[in-house]
């Protein structure tokens, strides 16, 4: 699924003549590093290292993980996936 979304975004950007450095792929740090490396090798800017938010956004993120523990498992599984 992720690769299809990435390919669709690249196709859309190309159809609008958007240069590779004219947009970015935002990905969770440590998740799908293989895709991050591939995009960088293709000339796309590297995704942000880590998005840090304070205040309400942090509560929403933590609350989301508490409401859906499967998300925590997803993150942990992907941290070690290459």
Image: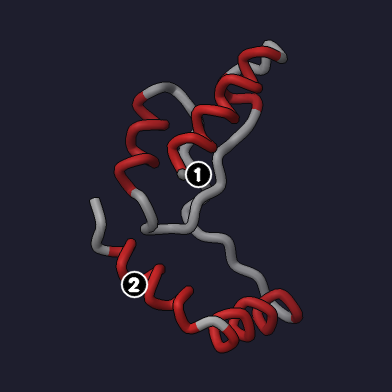
In the rendered image, the vertical position of residue 14 relative to residue 34, given as above or below: above
Using the rendered view, name the quadrant where residue 58 is placed.
Answer: bottom right
Q: Position of residue 49 (x, y in %)?
A: 47, 53
Q: Nearer the viewer, residue 13 or 46?
A: 13
Q: Residues within 10 Å of mark 2 (few under 14, many from 20)?
A: few
Q: Earlier in the sequence, mark 2 or mark 1?
A: 1
Q: Position of residue 6 (x, y in %)?
A: 51, 34
In the rendered image, the vertical position of residue 17 relative to residue 35, given as above or below: above
Q: Residue furthest right?
A: 56
Residue at (40, 31) in percent of width and height: 40
Q: Position of residue 43 (x, y in %)?
A: 44, 22
Q: Which residue is mark 1?
A: 47
Residue 76's disc number: 2
Q: Residues within 10 Å of mark 1 (few under 14, many from 20)?
A: some
Residue at (25, 57) in percent of width and height: 81
Q: Under tag 2, what secondary structure?
A: helix
Residue 36's disc number: none
């Amino acid at each position: 699924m992720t690769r299809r979304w990435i390919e669709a975004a690249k196709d859309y950007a190309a159809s609008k003549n958007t240069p590779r450095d004219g947009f970015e792929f935002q990905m969770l740090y440590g998740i799908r590093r293989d895709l991050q490396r591939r995009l960088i090798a293709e000339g796309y800017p590297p995704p942000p290292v880590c998005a840090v938010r304070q205040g309400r956004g942090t509560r929403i993120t933590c609350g989301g993980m508490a409401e859906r523990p499967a998300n925590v498992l997803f993150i942990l599984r992907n941290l070690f996936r290459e």
